[in-house]
């Protein structure tokens, strides 16, 4: 069943990003070569053959820069160096080159909205008095009220709690406040400042010059703030929010597009845009702005035929006018693993509703996650795979409180379980932790469940019915089949609880979301199925790929 895939994108393919399979590496949890319990660049290098055999076209690395790690590296102290826990700049350059020789491109993560509190700019700003030019690169403001002890605005942080922290003056008295849409360790930059713009353009060039094939832009809709800093009103029209999706952002991304387009081969910009309005979302994908953006509507969608179908239709409809390809994303390092999410009564995802485990049926969840993977891989556009989803890993929900690291958990007062549960180090081999993630005897930074001995890459590679084998086979078919890479999508008639569509003339995907068996059409050949069955009656929660 397992076949060696052909690379989907040839070396000179200018359109590689339109249907690429992009694998997200959460570096800290991928593979640890030196035994400190933290994944590193050498660990990735050692597993490049695994990634090639899986059949991915590109790797997206979550931030690997020097960082105090207050938010898993999304608090960058120096964009031009690699954090020592991960390796060195020359190792990163070598990794980019070696991956490329195997046909795998590299996408780096840029975090323009904020820096680490340890970034030299912020340290300078703290050391300088109110009103000084050093503070202009951030959002420093006096507090409200007679003693200035009330926050400048009542905004709520994306991690919960206020968005402002008060500073101390050098003499120990209380000083100005600074803005942070995320944790206090992540002060927001002022994008009206020319040096902030120039520095990010230079950082972009720094990584493109080192061979990065693209950048993922973190929190891409948040950079620009209304300088008046008004409260978030109740009935905002699009573009009126004080810090989300403001029209001035487009000019920034147009200037970035000009930079990436100045390179002879195609380098891409991928936006992290959580925007409810599909039209507003698509504006970022106009031909002189970003190439693609993550499809969070699809990610958050419950396991429900009508909802999935309308998400797919809305996605394709929104992308068509700007001629941008859609992306299909089932998970990432911020959300609940699909195997767990699909095994619950509420199969949708939302940050606001994220709570510790209630009842989870992992057998059902895994069955659905496998079907969802075949669905996502059959849709037109680019595909993202979060590390470990190809192994069918569940969310880990019993990490001891003393080992939790995510600020989202702490800043919610413990109400939100946080994102550590999807960031547990990968199980590669062996019968007990660290499962080949670290050298024997080392302790991974988050504990791995002992039950993962059945989910190691080693065990799954030897089992044709495993989730890993399903991913490998499906990605191999996808890479080979032009219908899947470039063909349009046409819905096929049938039960509303079955998603059935054709790609080009001869390929079809059917997903049964009903509780009953569904008969397959006659005269079709089965290419792949997410769950084994008799070939005639498609079982519930099963996807099948067919040759018509
Ligand atoms: C993005 C990242 C997330 C991070 C946040 C702040 O949403 O995906 O992990 O915490 O930005 O940088």
Image (cartoon, rainbow, N blue to C red):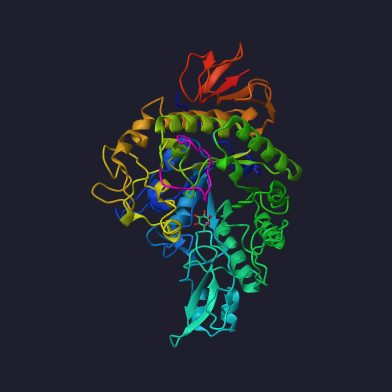
Res 325 → quadrant: top right
Residue drawn where x is 35% and y is 41% of the image? 427
Relative to the observer, which residue lies in front, 486 or 93?
A: 486
Residue drawn where x is 49% and y is 60% of the image? 74
Q: Is residue 495 left or right of residue 395?
A: right
Q: Is residue 487 left or right of residue 118?
A: right
**Whole-percent x, y for residue 281 in the image:** 68, 50
Magenta highlight on residue 510: no
Residue drawn where x is 53% and y is 19% of the image? 516
Relative to the observer, which residue lies in front, 303 or 51?
A: 303
**Whole-percent x, y for residue 112 in the image:** 57, 63
Task: Specify start and end residues of the magenta stretch as a single range.
Answer: 342-357
Residue 4 seen from this side: no
Q: Is 312 drawn above or below residue 68 in the view shown?
A: above
Magenta highlight on residue 353: yes
**Whole-percent x, y for residue 193 in the image:** 64, 73
**Whole-percent x, y for residue 372 in the image:** 53, 32
* Residue reaching furthest to the right: 321
């Amino acid at each position: 069943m397992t076949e060696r895939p052909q690379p989907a994108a040839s070396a000179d393919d200018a359109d590689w990003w339109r249907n690429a399979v992009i694998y997200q590496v959460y570096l800290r949890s991928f593979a640890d070569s030196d035994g400190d319990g933290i994944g590193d660049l050498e660990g990735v290098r050692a597993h490049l053959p695994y990634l090639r055999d899986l059949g991915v076209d590109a790797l997206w690395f979550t931030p690997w820069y020097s960082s105090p790690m207050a938010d898993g590296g999304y608090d960058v102290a120096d964009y031009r160096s690699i954090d020592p826990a991960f390796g060195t700049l020359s190792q990163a350059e070598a990794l980019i080159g070696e991956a490329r020789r195997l046909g795998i491109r590299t996408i780096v993560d840029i975090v323009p909205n904020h820096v680490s509190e340890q970034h030299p700019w912020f340290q300078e700003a703290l050391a300088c008095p109110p009103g000084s030019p050093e503070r202009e690169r951030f959002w420093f403001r006096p507090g409200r009220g007679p003693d200035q002890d009330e926050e400048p605005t009542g905004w709520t942080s994306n991690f919960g709690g206020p968005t402002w922290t008060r500073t101390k003056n050098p003499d120990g008295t209380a000083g100005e406040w600074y803005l942070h849409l995320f944790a206090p360790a992540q002060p927001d930059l002022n994008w009206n400042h020319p040096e902030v713009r120039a520095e990010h353009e230079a950082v972009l060039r720094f990584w493109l010059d080192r061979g990065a094939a693209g950048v993922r832009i973190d929190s891409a809709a948040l950079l620009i703030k209304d300088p008046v800093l008004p409260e978030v009103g109740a009935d905002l029209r699009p573009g009126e929010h004080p810090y989300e999706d403001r029209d001035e952002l487009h000019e920034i991304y147009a200037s970035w597009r000009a930079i990436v387009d100045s390179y002879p081969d195609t380098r891409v910009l991928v936006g992290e845009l959580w925007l409810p309005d599909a039209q507003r979302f698509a504006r970022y994908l106009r031909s002189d702005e970003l190439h693609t953006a993550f499809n969070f509507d699809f990610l958050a969608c419950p396991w429900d035929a009508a909802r999935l179908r309308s998400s797919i239709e809305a996605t394709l409809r929104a992308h068509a006018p700007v001629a941008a390809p859609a992306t299909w994303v089932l998970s990432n390092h911020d959300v609940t693993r699909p195997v767990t999410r699909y095994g619950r009564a509420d199969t949708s995802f939302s940050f606001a509703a994220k709570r510790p485990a209630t009842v989870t049926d992992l057998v059902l969840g895994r069955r659905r996650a496998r079907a969802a993977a075949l669905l996502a891989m059959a849709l037109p556009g680019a595909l993202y795979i979060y590390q470990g989803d190809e192994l069918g890993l569940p969310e880990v929900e019993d990490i001891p409180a003393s080992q939790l690291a995510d600020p989202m958990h702490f800043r919610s007062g413990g109400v939100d379980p946080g994102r550590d549960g999807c960031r547990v180090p990968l199980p590669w081999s062996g019968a007990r932790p660290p499962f080949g993630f670290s050298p024997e005897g080392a302790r991974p930074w988050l504990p791995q469940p002992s039950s993962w001995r059945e989910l190691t890459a080693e065990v799954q590679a030897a089992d044709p019915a495993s989730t890993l084998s399903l991913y490998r086979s499906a990605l191999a078919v996808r890479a080979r089949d032009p219908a899947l890479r470039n063909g349009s999508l046409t819905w096929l008639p049938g039960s509303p609880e079955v998603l059935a569509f054709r790609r080009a003339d001869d390929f079809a995907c059917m997903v049964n979301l009903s509780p009953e068996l569904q008969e397959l059409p006659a005269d079709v050949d089965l290419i792949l199925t997410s769950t084994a069955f008799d070939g005639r009656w498609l079982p519930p929660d099963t996807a099948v790929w067919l040759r018509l």
